[in-house]
Image (tube, rainbow, N blue to C red):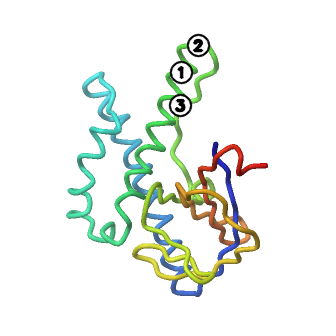
Amino acid sequence: MFKSYKFRLYPNNSQEKKLLGIIGMCRNLYNSALQERRDFYKKYNKSRSYVDQAKFLCEIKEILPEYKNIHSQILQNILKRLDKSFQGFFRRLKSGEKPGFPRFLSKDRYNSFCFPQSGFKIVNNRLNLSKIGSIKINLHRELIGKIKTCTIIVNNLGEWSACFSTEVEKQAMV
């Protein structure tokens, strides 16, 4: 069974700049991957998959060195996010619902990134994020279970949060 926790983050100015930069680059990667899938389909009448696109992440880091400053699993997760959007689109199309083709995301619609397995650690009321640094976190309650993911989110007011997904046994939930 999974349980989610949300805690407020308090990054300093340089950390906030890094976080905003990462969100911007993640949004660019998402939109570029979406455009590539559209172009590939128009040209070859075939669909691109997550695996096809993930093979090129190393090349992207060589061509655009700023992506070397982002944890590799964050980049992989972006492509999985896009793939999930397409799977939902095709599922809705098949079942006769209004499909809603995956759309390009603006600055207002893309506000988070996820560490799906590693790259984060909580030590002494601070969240250590790979390639970002140690950010003050308000741990107002105990985290129960094994932490599986860490998602960093910024809201419209510029407030930062960390959401953790943990795996817990059913007895621990009582």
Along the polypeptide, which appears first: circle 3 or circle 1? 1
Label 1 Cα crowd, 10 Å radius (few <14 / some 14-19 / many 20+): few
Q: Secondary structure at mark 2?
A: loop
Residue under the point 46% across and 41% down: 82
Residue under the point 33% across and 34% down: 49
In the foreground, 61 or 5: 5
Q: Is residue 92 above or below residue 82?
A: above
Comparing labels 3 and 2, the label whose residue is closer to the camera: 2
Q: Position of residue 30 (x, y in %)?
A: 44, 50
The quarter of the image holding the N terminus is top right
The kind of residue tagged 3 is: Phe
Q: Is residue 13 above or below residue 101?
A: below
Q: Is residue 82 above or below residue 97?
A: below
Q: Position of residue 19 (x, y in %)?
A: 52, 73
| Residue under pointer 3 | 101
| Residue under pointer 2 | 95
Question: CA–CA distance between discs 3 and 1?
Answer: 11 Å
Report the side of 67 relative to 4 (left or right). Answer: left
Residue under the point 35% across and 38% down: 50
Label 2 Cα crowd, 10 Å radius (few <14 / some 14-19 / many 20+): few
Question: CA–CA distance between discs 2 and 1?
Answer: 6 Å
The kind of residue tagged 1 is: Arg
Residue under the point 65% across and 81% down: 10
| Residue under pointer 1 | 91
Contact (CB < 8 A) between labels 2 and 1? yes
Q: Residue furthest front?
A: 171
Report the side of 9 relative to 56 (left or right). Answer: right
Along the polypeptide, which appears first: circle 3 or circle 2? 2
Q: Position of residue 21 (x, y in %)?
A: 47, 72
